[in-house]
Image (cartoon, grey):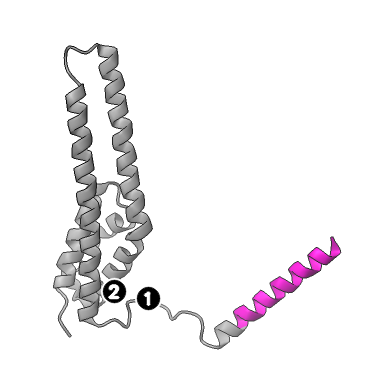
Amino acid sequence: MRIGCAIRRRHYFLLFIIFVVGISCGAAPEPDKTVYSKTSNKELKEKTLSLVKNIRALVDSYNQKDRALMAEYDKKNRPEIRTDDRKAIREQWLKESDALHNSSMRTYRDNYWSDAILLRNEIYKRLPKTLQQKNLEPLYQNPTNVLGIQVIADNLELISKSLPES
């Protein structure tokens, strides 16, 4: 017991030393600096348009799969089928549709969400205040559905194309 406690104290002490030395050596991030802060406008535009392309591919994939689910549901949902069976078919369709939606939203969150926010913020730092749409900030922070993700892609494309080349 005592050995384990001593080892843990030593680890905490070493972590503290590393933290203090890291700060004194300038290892702490500068305020308001991101991975895109030193990126040129041209590179920022390219990265943003690449992200937009990926987000749109995700949205298109979702829409195709959702249409396929709806078509399958429409084939099965016929008036001659008993009401209980139609209800079960509808519940299954809703379950599959929700799973598809949740999967698409999770993919967006895991792969694109943080970059979308960082790129938007960096572009806004470089654009005049008149071109900034503050009303979309909550949507960037918490898109509630795939339509919201599409709006984010559209906005990113618009503001990236507003950047001057230099």
Asked whether the residues under the numbered discs 2 and 1 touch, taking CB atoms below 8 Å apart as contact, a structural biologist would say: yes
Disc 2 is placed on an element classified as helix
**Looking at the rendered structure, which numbered label has been put on residue 122?**
2
Disc 1 is placed on an element classified as loop
Question: Could you tell whether 41 is left or right of 29 in the image?
Answer: left
Please provide percent x and percent y for residue 132: 20, 68
98 w.r.t. 159: above or below: above
The span from disc 2 to disc 1 (Cα, nearest Å) is 8 Å
Q: Which residues are magenta?
A: 1-20
User: Sequence order check: which comes first, mark 2 or mark 1?
Assistant: 1
Q: Quadrant of the C terminus?
A: bottom left
Question: Could you tell whether 87 is left or right of 6 in the image?
Answer: left
Q: Image point 27% across, 46% down: which residue?
A: 145
**Looking at the rendered structure, which numbered label has been put on residue 63?**
none
Looking at the rendered structure, the number of numbered marks drawn on it comes to 2
Question: Could you tell whether 125 is left or right of 161 in the image?
Answer: right
The residue labelled by disc 1 is 34
Q: Quadrant of the N terminus?
A: bottom right
Q: Image point 51% across, 86% down: which residue?
A: 26
Confirm whether residue 133 shows in the render. Answer: no
Task: Check if residue 8 falls in the magenta segment.
Answer: yes
Which quarter of the picture shows residue 129? bottom left
In-front residue for pair 147/83: 83
Residue type at tag 1: Thr
Residue type at tag 2: Glu
- Farthest residue to the bottom: give it: 25
Q: Image point 29% across, 64% down: which residue?
A: 116
Please provide percent x and percent y for residue 31: 42, 78
11 w.r.t. 72: above or below: below
